[in-house]
Image: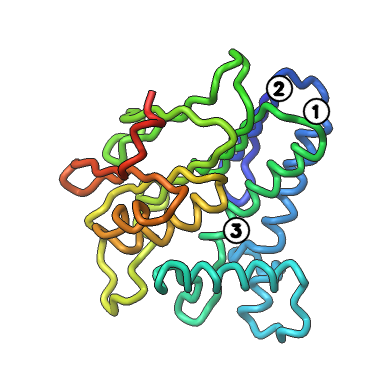
């Protein structure tokens, strides 16, 4: 069973192999809608918007405090390149997407599902096998032509996330550059033990520019694939073991 809905301004697709009970699908989509209501910087009623308009810390929800703490931890782990402070406002979306996909996957695991796929805006968590009883195959798009797949990777119980200019254009910048300019990297894909880890490190590594892929190579458990403005691909030492 497979379904796609537009939530958080992007398509979210959930596929549960062999499942004909759509209540589990609906539970996942309801969860993503609740995430959007809390963390959308575009909704004035969201908690993050209220925080950006002065909601005192003692009134923050426990979950919001946890997410913002995770953002601060990620900032330290990435030497400051993961930064949610933008012109005085907080925008944790660079962490929330992967974090929420990972949470949604855990919900399905708790409901007894073992073979499924969750994708939100190109970031993906898979578990088990696809409907052909094989590991899931995920395509990496060409950042110069999004209709073209340039690599296919095979995953099982792992996550994959891509940061780049595919859809939203330039939206991730080096926080240490006072005059932000387009990166020399067009896209950077990270495979990790789960989509939360892949997503937060992909965001930070993309902000690092050309040094980002080397940073990913230095983190145990992560592999990466980057394409630069000259259409040259660079990848980490262990990336090729995933390639179909």
Which numbered dot is residue 22? Answer: 1
Q: Judging from the image, what secondary structure is the residue with disc 3 in?
A: helix
Sort mark 1 into few (<14), some (14-19) or many (20+) by Cα contacts within 10 Å: few
Report whether 61 appears left or right of 243: right
Residue at (40% x, 45% y) in the render = 223
Q: Which quarter of the rendered picture does the C terminus lie within?
A: top left
Label annotation for residue 96: 3
* Residue 138 % position (x, y): 46, 30
Q: In what quadrant of the picture does the N terminus appear?
A: top right
Q: How far separated are the C-alphas under marks 3 and 1? A: 25 Å
State yes or no: discs 1 and 2 in contact (Cβ < 8 Å). Answer: yes
Q: Gap between marks 2 and 3, in whole Å?
A: 26 Å
Spatial CA distance of label 1 from label 2 is 8 Å
Q: Residue at x 50, y 52 (%)?
A: 199
Say which mark, if any, is on residue 1. Answer: 2
Query: In the shown orientation, is residue 113 left or right of residue 44?
Result: right
């Amino acid at each position: 069973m497979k379904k796609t809905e537009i939530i958080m301004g992007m398509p979210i697709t959930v596929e549960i192999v062999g499942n004909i009970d759509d209540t589990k699908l609906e539970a996942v989509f309801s969860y993503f809608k609740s995430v959007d209501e809390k963390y959308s910087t575009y909704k004035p009623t969201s908690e993050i918007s209220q925080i950006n308009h002065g909601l005192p810390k003692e009134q923050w929800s426990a979950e919001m405090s946890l997410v913002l703490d995770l953002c601060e931890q990620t900032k330290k782990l990435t030497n400051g390149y993961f930064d949610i402070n933008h012109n005085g406002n907080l925008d944790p979306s660079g962490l929330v997407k992967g974090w929420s996909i990972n949470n949604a996957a855990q919900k399905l695991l708790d409901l007894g599902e073992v073979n499924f796929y969750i994708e939100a805006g190109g970031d993906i968590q898979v578990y088990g096998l696809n409907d052909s009883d094989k590991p899931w195959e995920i395509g990496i798009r060409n950042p110069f032509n999004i209709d073209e797949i340039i690599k296919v990777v095979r995953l099982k119980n792992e996550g994959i996330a891509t940061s780049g200019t595919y859809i939203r254009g330039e939206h991730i910048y080096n926080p240490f550059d006072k005059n932000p300019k387009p990166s020399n990297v067009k896209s950077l894909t990270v495979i990790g033990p789960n989509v939360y880890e892949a997503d937060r490190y992909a965001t930070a590594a993309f902000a690092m520019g050309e040094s980002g892929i080397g940073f990913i190579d230095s983190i145990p458990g992560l592999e990466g694939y980057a394409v630069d403005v000259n259409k040259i691909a660079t990848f980490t030492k262990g990336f090729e073991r995933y390639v179909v």
